[in-house]
């Protein structure tokens, strides 16, 4: 993991096309802005984990198992 220090208004660039900017610092909360191409999905981690769990559950469903057998 890369750990960087940034101040309000400062940014970092990821993969030449994603900019992450510190917008506000209030106590122990930091508000960030993410500027990324529309085709790059950006999720809060807790939402991403829920999506992964839902996808795993769908894969384990009986209907999808039957579909796998057909392939």
Image (cartoon, grey):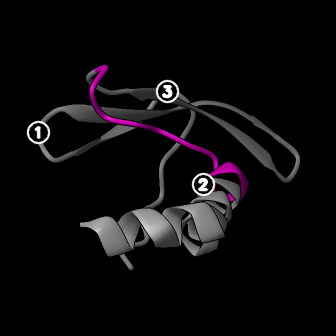
Q: Secondary structure at mark 2?
A: helix
Which residue is the site of mark 2?
A: 48
Farthest bottom residue in view: 1
Q: Nearer the viewer, mark 3 or mark 1?
A: 1
Q: Residues within 10 Å of mark 1 (few under 14, many from 20)?
A: few
Give percent across and percent down for residue 43.
56, 43
Q: Main secondary structure of the magenta part?
A: loop
Picture residue at 17% right of the left edge, 32% below the top: 17
First in sequence: mark 3 vs mark 1: 3
Q: Residues within 10 Å of mark 2 (few under 14, many from 20)?
A: few
First in sequence: mark 2 vs mark 1: 1
* Badge number at residue 9: 3
Picture residue at 11% right of the left edge, 39% below the top: 16
Tell me where the magenta segment starts and ends, as one range. Answer: 38-48
Labelled pair 2, 1 in contact (Cβ < 8 Å):
no
Compare residues 50 and 55 and report the one nearer the observer. 55
First in sequence: mark 3 vs mark 2: 3
Compare residues 2 and 55 and report the one nearer the observer. 55
Q: Residues within 10 Å of mark 3 (few under 14, many from 20)?
A: few
Quarter of image, res 71: bottom left
- Compared with 38, 19 (above or below) is below
Give percent across and percent down for residue 34.
45, 30
Give percent across and percent down for residue 26.
84, 38
* Badge number at residue 16: 1
Q: Nearer the viewer, mark 3 or mark 2?
A: 2
Give percent across and percent down for residue 44.
63, 47
Labelled pair 3, 1 in contact (Cβ < 8 Å):
no
Q: Secondary structure at mark 1?
A: loop
Compare residues 33 and 42 and report the one nearer the observer. 42
Whole-angstrom CA distance, mark 3 to mark 1, is 19 Å
Picture residue at 88% right of the left edge, 46% below the top: 27
Does residue 25 belong to the magenta stretch? no
């Amino acid at each position: 993991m890369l750990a960087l220090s940034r101040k309000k208004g400062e940014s970092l660039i990821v993969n030449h096309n994603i900019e992450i900017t510190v917008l506000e610092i209030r106590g122990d909360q930091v508000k960030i802005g993410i500027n990324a191409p529309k085709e790059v999905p950006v999720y809060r981690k807790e939402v991403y984990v829920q999506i992964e769990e839902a996808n795993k559950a769908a894969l384990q469903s009986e209907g999808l198992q039957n579909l796998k057998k057909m392939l």
